[in-house]
Amino acid sequence: MKQVAINIHDVFSSIATKYDRLNTILTLNIDKLWRKKAIKLCDIKENNKVLDLCCGTGKMIALECKAVGVDTEVIGLDFNKAMIDVGYTTLNKSLKNYKFNLIQGDVINLPFEDNTFNIITIAFGLRNIPDKTKAISEIYRVLKPGGKVVCLELSKPELPIFRNIYNLYFNFALPIIGYLGTQDKAAYYYLRDSVNGFMTKVKLREEFEHIGFDNTEFKSLTLGIASLHYGIKPLYE
């Protein structure tokens, strides 16, 4: 299968204004349901300090603001300014009474003190980070003891027949549909290759455990097309 060498930052800059629309088309709007399930799993309390990593255009931020209430600021972090700019434009229209702050930064070197957040989420972003172990370690560092991480990520279906059908769509149809919607073929070849090269659900759970998280587990969504991974930072180390 063809591998395309591209700059990830350039990929997201090129599709920033079309990212949400294409996600809706390519997932048949199921990504909206996945995010809601992720937020439910977080069990966010009013006034919790919440951080969304790889926040992109702010889809998770919108849900998290409504969970913490109007008096608490939700922070989003992303490495790509174009995505953040789209996020601000969108959220300023839909979250007029809520507090949020989107900052540009690096997940493997988070600009926060130890033990800062009650909840950290990362949706469709971990696979884009070259050093995933360092990223998970940084998440662990800035979580408060007893805090929870929830990671929503694309994955591979388990059922053999469905997996074969899905692979045909994901490996061949998706890059074509993505190109027709964005005129950027490389972006959707990258999406395909990043998912195909990502660690298995079991391996990611083991990575969370290795870093130190307790109660680590994953839940498959929509026959395994996506999955939720989660863990809790121990109260005592």
Image: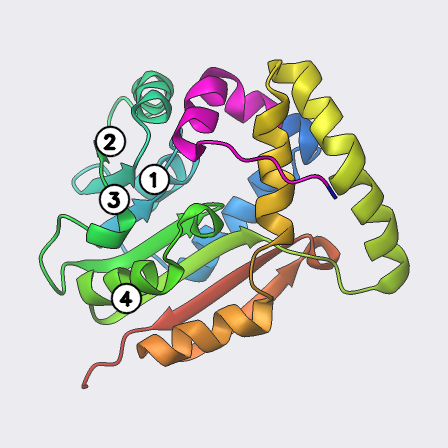
Whole-angstrom CA distance, mark 1 to mark 4, is 28 Å
Q: Which of 201 and 96 is in front in this view?
A: 201
Earlier in the chain: of badge 4 and badge 3, it is: 3
Q: Which of 131 and 40 is in front in this view?
A: 131
* Residue underneath mark 4: 137
* x and y, in percent, of residue 234 in the image: 26, 80
Q: Report crowding for label 4: few under 14, some 14 to 19, many 20 or more residues within 10 A (C-alpha).
A: some
Residue at x 39%, y 59% (from the top left corner) = 132
Residue at x 70%, y 15% (from the top left corner) = 180
**As shown in the figure, which amino acid type bears the numbered disc 4?**
Ser
Q: Can residue 47 be seen in this view?
A: no
* x and y, in percent, of residue 154 in the image: 59, 50
Local SS, label 3: loop
Whole-angstrom CA distance, mark 1 to mark 3, is 26 Å
121 relative position to 175: left or right: left
Whole-angstrom CA distance, mark 1 to mark 2, is 8 Å
Earlier in the chain: of badge 1 and badge 3, it is: 1
Q: What's the magenta region?
A: 2-22
The answer to the question of whether label 1 and label 2 lie on touching residues, with beta carbons closer than 8 A, is yes
Earlier in the chain: of badge 1 and badge 2, it is: 1
* x and y, in percent, of residue 139 in the image: 27, 61
Quadrant that contains the C terminus: bottom left
